[in-house]
Amino acid sequence: MNTYLTLPALGWRNFFQTQLSLEELESCHAVRIIEQHKNQYRYLSTEGEGTLPITQNVSSLTVGDWVLMSKEGRFERLLDRQSYFFRKASGTKVQKQSIASNVDTVFIVASLNDDFNLNRIERYLAITHEAQCEPVVVLTKADLCENIDDYLKPLRALDHHLMIETVNGLDETSLKGLYEFCKSGQTIALLGSSGVGKSTLVNTLKGLTNEDSSASATQGIREDDSKGRHTTTSRQLHFLPQGGLLLDTPGMRELQLAQCEEGIQQTFSDITELAKACRFNDCQHQNEPNCAVNQAIANGELELRRLQSYHKLMREQALNVATLAEKRAKDRDLGKMYRTIINEKRAKKNQ
């Protein structure tokens, strides 16, 4: 580990500096969370590295966060995030799950095989746009694909300005197009489902081979369905030879969106632009008369799949927002009840 780290090398910038008071400048130092485990966070600063136990006071941190620590090593507070990725927790849990924070660029990783899925990529684009980060779609396993254009054509149709890189994760020379996003102080996050080659990509960007002791573990794909096996189990920041910081995340096949309406609108900007010409301002693009979106589908200018994906994500995020809001309301009511009981017990005790 570099013992001469500077704050800018860790991703520090004026956005965070302006949040500090004069008193905090004198009594505290900033650290960045670089790993998240079950019971603790690991952080780095100009003074070295350390760990922070996950307690009730610091349970909401995530990898990429900047926090203030006292000179005695106490957690003081979390600094405002420049960007923040989260999702509704998977399964039946009614809670928000943090993914990463303070990211500049997101590599949305997909593989050039049967696991390629436009709907899933649209989900990642929505969450990236919501966080106001720059998306780059990285298509892996190009060396195993004979018809790359068949994948590029529908992907480019999503957004003509979308940056796309096709790579062989084992070939360093094929990753040169990614290096401009990996400069000193820049933070890059990798998002993608299990088995698309993220761990291999991490190793090659770090200049490692799979045999190196510090390399991330990799596993081959299953030949029957072209899907890989899950290898990354925790979120962590890696230092790159180019000077940037790379945040790897566990593969997420289920990415439930919440509070992501703006990101969805930006991801489906073709639909939102067409909707401006609809007869009704609140047109749902179903069976309404003079619907410009449905007319575009009839004319072959817009895919029906695209509209169906848009509707699905909008319904999903609205449902999850309502569910999370209901849980917060219940938690507030429960907290009020507990406080009332405690206050009544104290009052009786004082009598």
Image (spheres, rainbow, N blue to C red):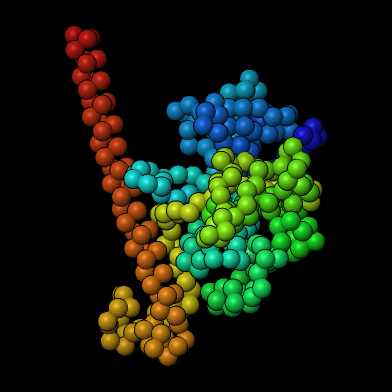
Percent of width and height locating residue 194: 55, 52
- Marks counted in the figure total 0
237 and 71: which one is in front? 237
User: Within the image, what quadrant is residue 238 found in?
Assistant: top right
Q: Is residue 200 above or below residue 76?
A: below
Q: Could one spot residue 226 in this view of the protein?
A: yes
Percent of width and height locating residue 47: 73, 29
Percent of width and height locating residue 215: 71, 42
Q: Is residue 75 above or below residue 150?
A: above
Instruction: Identify which residue is drawn at 55% across, 76% down.
Output: 154
Instruction: Identify which residue is drawn at 76% across, 63% down.
Output: 174
135 and 172: which one is in front? 172
Instruction: Identify which residue is drawn at 41% across, 46% down.
Output: 89
**Could you tell whether 287 is left or right of 163 in the image?**
left
Q: Is residue 351 above or below residue 311?
A: above
Quadrant location, the N terminus = top right
User: Within the image, what quadrant is residue 303 found in?
Assistant: bottom left
User: Within the image, what quadrant is residue 351 found in?
Assistant: top left
Q: Could one spot residue 243 in this view of the protein?
A: no
**Could you tell whether 98 is left or right of 198 in the image?**
left
Instruction: Identify which residue is drawn at 56% across, 55% down.
Output: 222
**Could you tell whether 167 is left or right of 350 in the image?**
right
**Could you tell whether 112 is left or right of 86 in the image?**
right
Percent of width and height locating residue 208: 77, 46
